[in-house]
Image: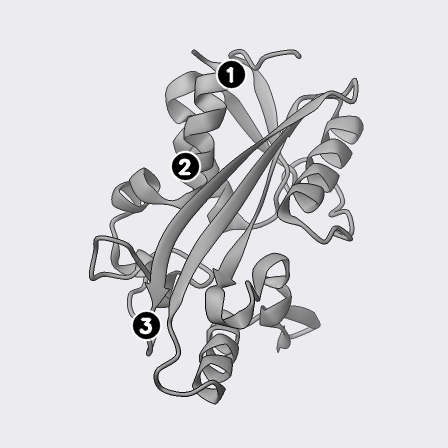
Amino acid sequence: MPRLSTGKLVIATHNAGKLKEIQALLAPYGVECLSAGALGLPEPAETGTTFIENALIKAQAAAQVAQLPALADDSGLCVEALGGAPGVYTADWAEADVFEGGPGRDWYMAMGKVEGKLAELGPDTPRDCHFACVLALAWPNGQHTVYEGRAPGTLTWPPRGKLGFGYDPVFIPVGDTRTFAELDPAEKHAISHRADAFAKLVADQFS
């Protein structure tokens, strides 16, 4: 299996929040990150039913088109009382025609959907959940590897904090009273699901 070295790496995402986090996590290793959006790469259809399948779809598509190593993230919120939902459909729960000229994502609406479904189950419903992250690293020759991370926590309502993105304002990590959206980015990077997956990637690729 090839290994990453200091050089160019395509980050196969069009999500600005994810891109910023990934760039920050890779910064100490001398890797030049190029975003799929900046390279004009198309977004492949995420037809997988697991985080691993969707991460590989994105990484392999970017690696083939750019002819460079590519890293893709597929992540989501998994709520135990909802059978692991929204899970791989985390972003789909936020789909709405909120931007002029086409569909966009309304994360407050998505957080409200989760809260509404929990409310339907009753006030004593456990609010345990976790963020899951799979990082898929793919090379143009078809080789690939994956790394899985997790951040356990509980859900709160109403949303709190203006940092982070996605469902961060309703997620309280284990051991803290603040939401991900109330944490300084450096604090979040140290304990997030993405950081957990990255620690495994770093140990494998740069040790």
| Among numbered discs 1 and 3, the one appearing first in the sequence | 3
- The residue under the point 27% across, 41% down is 186
Residue type (three-letter) at the residue carrying disc 3: Thr
| Among numbered discs 1 and 2, the one appearing first in the sequence | 2
Q: Secondary structure at mark 3?
A: loop
Residue that badge 2 annotates: 196
Report the side of 143 relative to 177 (left or right).
right
Residue that badge 1 annotates: 205
- The residue under the point 62% across, 57% down is 88
Colour pattern? one colour
Residue 143 screen position, x and y as percent: 73, 20
Q: Secondary structure at mark 2?
A: helix
Residue 50, placed above or below residue 197: below
Report the side of 112 relative to 96 (left or right).
left
- The residue under the point 25% across, 44% down is 187
Q: Is residue 98 visible?
A: yes
Q: Nearer the viewer, residue 200 or 159?
A: 200
Q: Nearer the viewer, residue 100 or 181?
A: 181
Give the CA distance from mark 1 to mark 2.
Answer: 14 Å
Q: Nearer the viewer, residue 19 or 53?
A: 53
Labels 3 & 2 near each other (Cβ < 8 A): no
**Picture quarter with the C terminus:** top left
- The residue under the point 48% across, 65% down is 79
Residue that badge 3 annotates: 156
Give the CA distance from mark 1 to mark 3.
Answer: 36 Å
Q: Secondary structure at mark 1?
A: helix
Q: Is residue 99 visible?
A: no
